[in-house]
Image (cartoon, grey):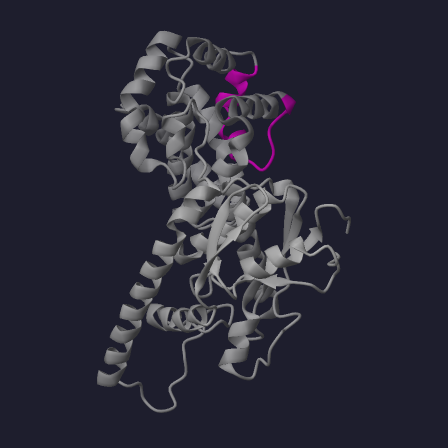
Amino acid sequence: MASSMLEAVLGSLTPQIRQELAARLHEPPTAIQTGLTGTAAAILAGLAGRAADSGFLSEILAMARGSAAPGLLGNAAAIGSEAPSGPQQGQLVAKFLSSVFGSHQGQVATAISQQAGLTAGSGMGLLETTAPRVLGCLNSVDAVALGRMLQAEASSLQSHLPAGLSGLLGDAGVLSAVAPARYAAAARSRWLMALAILGVLVLAWLLFRSVEQPKHGAQPAVNATGEAATSAADAVSNAASSWAALGEMTRVKLPDGSEIDVPAKGVEVQLVQWLNDPATRVDATTWFAFDRLLFDSGKATLQQASQEQLGNVAAILKAYPGLKIHIGGYTDNDGDPQQNVQLSQNRADNVMAALTMLGVDPDRMDAKGYGQAHPIADNSSEQGRQKNRRIAMRVTEKPGTKS
């Protein structure tokens, strides 16, 4: 017998459902398992955040006991399938998720995907699969009992929540957002700390190489996409060198009164200057390449070091409400072209998803992977290939203008 609501929900997600989800979403089974745990915790935490609202809990219980619920909750195959078994099922799931998360469903789905290492769209599929299982665990209790159960379990749910969703437990189910001012206030210290850590790791790597040099002529390992599988130390060394070239930190004031601390030669400064220049016009050739993003080698997973620049760009988008952007992902020409397109698409999707989680309306962005097309440097050198492996953004609508 399950000792908690979370265990009960996860127990109802049978191995068959998990296998069907992995196959349908084209994701690894282990990632699906991680994602389902985070999804169940997020939904229960959303309910726990309003455990004292008897009216809200009564509304939720009415959904669990509604005429559409019995058939929906009893059909595991339908829940795990690609499409709802009927309009009632889809409507019930949509109504339930909207009641729990409001307009923040996209942010929750993004956080789930990032925690589990899933592609951007899979988080919503997990939410739609897990929601009816949660409802199924509620149809035998009343509002008072449910409130007590949720309050008792609230603290234990915290450890299972995807990063960024802790606000579910403390603000009536509404996600907490990181204010741009917070980035501005802490950016300088984070920048200095990051450079210090990078410097230490580079020195450690240089010492290591001085002790054990690779054999002459040895070639770097290449992953499935053809992208060189560099070590963490190599990535740190490359990042430290390129980031240092961006210059000293400077403070940029945005139209909404917020401020961001950014490198003087960084892309944030370039973008803000372009937006503030009345002579600039939207076109198909003006791109702004992110210069402080790091991904795991050969993967679409954003490293933690990327968060500062993502926060700055999110602050810029919020400060210019009419601004819309297109996010492009690119690779070098190593490896299979189709796999490179997929990798670049996944990376562009994850950047867009990260900006969405920081509070940017997804309707103001779109993302596309171009693979090895449109190189900006010579792929015959490592320096050139590194430049071609990039994420860039193009303004598609400037405040006061149309594309």
- Residue at the image position 32 percent from the left and 30 percent from the top: 157
Q: Position of residue 367 (x, y in %)?
A: 62, 53
Look at the picture and state if 10 lies above or below 263.
above
The N terminus is located in which quarter? top left
Task: Specify the farthest residue to the left.
Answer: 211
- Say whether residue 105 is visible: yes
Q: Position of residue 30 (x, y in %)?
A: 38, 48
Task: Specify the farthest residue to the right.
Answer: 402
Range drawn in magenta:
68-87
Task: Specify the farthest residue to the bottom.
Answer: 216
Q: Position of residue 399 (x, y in %)?
A: 70, 46
Look at the picture and state if 314 lies above or below 344.
above
Look at the picture and state if 118 lies above or below 343.
above
Q: Nearer the viewer, residue 381 or 359?
A: 359
Please tell me in which quadrant of the rendered image residue 338 appears: bottom right
Q: Nearer the viewer, residue 237 or 397?
A: 397
Q: Nearer the viewer, residue 84 or 239?
A: 239
- Say whether residue 328 is visible: no
The answer to if 285 sits in the magenta stretch is no
